[in-house]
């Protein structure tokens, strides 16, 4: 069934909450990894959303 | 409302854009005054201008009813996502995320994430909608769904299906629907975690059951995590290495480098003898000849092949060339006017006047592949207000033989003489030179008054 009148925003709010929670955990481990890499002197080539 | 309001500027109640005496202005309604004040005085505007992320503007006046009139800097040439290559769309997406990420630091948030809020200026994407910012309210990002439809889903389709599908933007003005995206993406996309999170997961919330999530707090750090995830997801998207007929054309297909060098020399001689102004390079491939135009205001470097336009954009970006705007344009089928009343997004040939038109190694394709007559081509190219640099390729040329080998071309009126007669209706010859190591001729024409 094509659901024309569902506010796409409703689903998107839940999705954002789930994604944010999920990636929060991922980024926690990534921060540890980055810390170790910095410690070992390995530079990350990744482009970052925060211009550094 | 004013009569000269731009047909594309009607969606945002906060402001609209209009033209007066060929200049662009934005009227900001008094209801949006607080947001505007915060944007200007919180430091957000300064940071975005400093980074060249947002279009600069001058405040002209405050009217009696407290409406503001600002004059934004002009965009040399307006272009649309259905004319952008993969990397251009990707950069526009990353810019939008960076702006949202900065805005949150100043307690503001983008209320929409339309790809039409982005244009290209000096080789880089720039955000043009000054009134897209609203106060951040610790809720999930209102524009997330629109961001997915306008940027994320199309980028996946370009990556997983074909980079030549940018024309989908023409059919879906408000971006790609998630269900449609799911239907067209190949099975291998299921192995991409981001596809599962941002496409399949939202599609699984089909019912309209009321969710209380809306009222839940969505902290800044959560929002930042979401943005960072979207950013890394998009930043990592790469097109698969693939050759089209036209990419690496100059490496693959030019058997005689002396011929190419001779052509380049004549071309540079022609171009340096004129003031090219606003240039339209048709069939520009990866911008090989566009690059040789050093003295132009801007060069709209077009080709119908999405791969070569992508190369063109990447090269200019890597080499910090700022006056070339590569666009996917098929001269036989240029972008139409779309949206409300067919006016919201302008037709390609109605956006700006071109001073100089360049057509290198193009007309034999138009004549022999698309059956367009030399008269029709001459008439079309007379859009050039001042100059035309055009290459004539005789029927004895190996490339013409190649494209006509299965075609009866006896009935096609095509010769140097017919070529010159056709173009003489609109242009006069300034320079004409044979290109050595070939039978081709390069012309510099000037438009007759």
Image: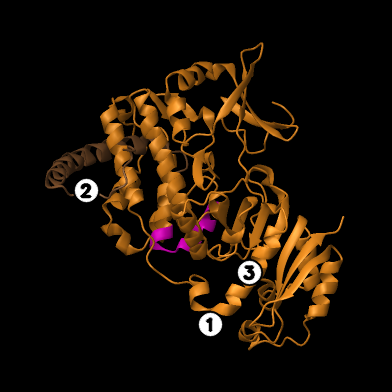
Chain colours: A brown, B orange
Looking at the image, which is closer to me, B340 or B264? B264
Label 2 in the same subunit as label 3: no
Tell which tag, 1 or 3, sits nearer the viewer.
3
Dot 3: few (<14), some (14–19), or many (≥20) neighbours within 10 Å? some
Identify the image quadrant of the C terminus of chain B: bottom right
> Percent from the top left, x then y, of residue B279?
67, 54
Looking at the image, which is closer to me, B122 or B225? B122
Residue at x-position 49% and y-position 16%: B34
Q: Is residue A16 left or right of residue B251?
A: left
Residue B286 visible to an observer of this rendering: yes
Does dot 3 land on a helix, a strand or a loop?
A: helix
Residue at x-position 40% and y-position 33%: B100
Does dot 2 land on a helix, a strand or a loop?
A: loop
Residue at x-position 71% and y-position 53%: B275
Pointer 1 chain = B
> Percent from the top left, x then y, of residue B297?
64, 48
| Residue receiving disc 2 | A43
The image shows residue B383, relative to residue B131, as above or below, that is below
Give the Cα separation between the discs numbered 1 and 3.
Answer: 18 Å
Magenta highlight: main SS: helix
Q: Which residues are magenta?
A: B158-169
Q: Kindly indicate the quadrant of the structure image that contains residue B318.
A: bottom left
- Badge 2 vs badge 3, beta-carbon distance below 8 Å: no
| Residue receiving disc 3 | B265
Would residue B163 be counted in the magenta stretch? yes
Q: Where residue B255 is drawn, which disc sits there? A: 1
Dot 1: few (<14), some (14–19), or many (≥20) neighbours within 10 Å? few
Give the Cα separation between the discs numbered 2 and 3.
Answer: 44 Å
The image shows residue B311, relative to residue B95, as above or below, that is below
Label located before the other in sequence (1 or 3): 1
Residue at x-position 14% and y-position 45%: A33
Would residue A2 be counted in the magenta stretch? no
């Amino acid at each position: 069934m094509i659901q024309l009148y569902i506010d796409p925003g409703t689903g998107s709010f839940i999705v954002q909450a789930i994604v944010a929670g999920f990636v929060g955990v991922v980024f926690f481990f990534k921060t540890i990894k980055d810390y170790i890499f910095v410690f070992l002197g390995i530079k990350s080539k990744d482009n970052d959303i925060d211009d550094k | 409302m004013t009569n000269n309001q731009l047909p594309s500027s009607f969606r945002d109640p906060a402001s609209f854009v209009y033209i007066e005496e060929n200049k662009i202005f934005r009227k900001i309604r008094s209801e949006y005054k607080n947001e505007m004040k915060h944007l200007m005085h919180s430091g957000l505007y300064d940071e975005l201008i400093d980074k060249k992320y947002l279009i600069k503007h001058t405040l002209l006046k405050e009217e009696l009813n407290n409406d503001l009139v600002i004059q934004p800097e002009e965009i040399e040439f307006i272009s649309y996502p259905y004319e952008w290559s993969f990397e251009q769309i990707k950069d526009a997406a990353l810019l939008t995320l960076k702006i949202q990420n900065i805005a949150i630091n100043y307690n503001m948030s983008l209320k929409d994430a339309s790809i039409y809020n982005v244009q290209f200026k000096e080789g880089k994407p720039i955000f043009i909608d000054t009134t897209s910012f609203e106060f951040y309210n610790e809720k999930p990002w209102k524009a997330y769904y629109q961001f997915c439809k306008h940027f994320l889903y199309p980028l996946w389709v370009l990556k997983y299906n074909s980079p030549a599908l940018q024309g989908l933007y023409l059919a879906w003005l408000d971006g790609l629907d998630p269900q449609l995206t799911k239907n067209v993406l190949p099975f291998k996309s299921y192995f991409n975690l981001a596809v599962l999170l941002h496409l399949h997961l939202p599609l699984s919330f089909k019912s309209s059951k009321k969710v209380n999530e809306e009222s839940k707090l969505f902290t800044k750090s959560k929002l930042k995590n979401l943005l960072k995830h979207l950013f890394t997801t998009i930043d990592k998207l790469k097109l698969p290495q693939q050759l089209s007929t036209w990419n690496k054309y100059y490496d693959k297909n030019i058997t005689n480098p002396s011929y190419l060098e001779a052509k380049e020399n004549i071309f540079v001689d022609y171009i340096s003898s004129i003031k090219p102004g606003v240039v339209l390079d048709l069939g520009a491939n990866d911008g090989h000849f566009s690059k040789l135009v050093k003295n132009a205001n801007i060069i709209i470097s077009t080709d119908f092949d999405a791969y070569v336009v992508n190369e063109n954009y990447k090269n200019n970006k890597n080499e910090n060339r700022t006056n070339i705007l590569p666009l996917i344009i098929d001269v036989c089928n240029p972008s139409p006017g779309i949206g409300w009343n067919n006016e919201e997004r302008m037709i390609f040939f109605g956006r700006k006047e071109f001073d100089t038109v360049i057509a290198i190694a193009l007309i034999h394709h138009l004549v022999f592949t698309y059956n367009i007559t030399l008269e029709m081509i001459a008439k079309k190219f007379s859009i050039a207000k001042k100059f035309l640099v055009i290459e004539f390729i005789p029927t004895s040329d190996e490339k013409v033989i190649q494209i006509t080998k299965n075609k009866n071309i006896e009935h096609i009126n095509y010769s140097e003489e017919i070529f010159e007669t056709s173009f003489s209706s609109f242009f006069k010859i300034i320079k004409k030179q044979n290109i050595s190591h070939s039978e081709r001729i390069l012309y510099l024409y000037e438009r007759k008054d």
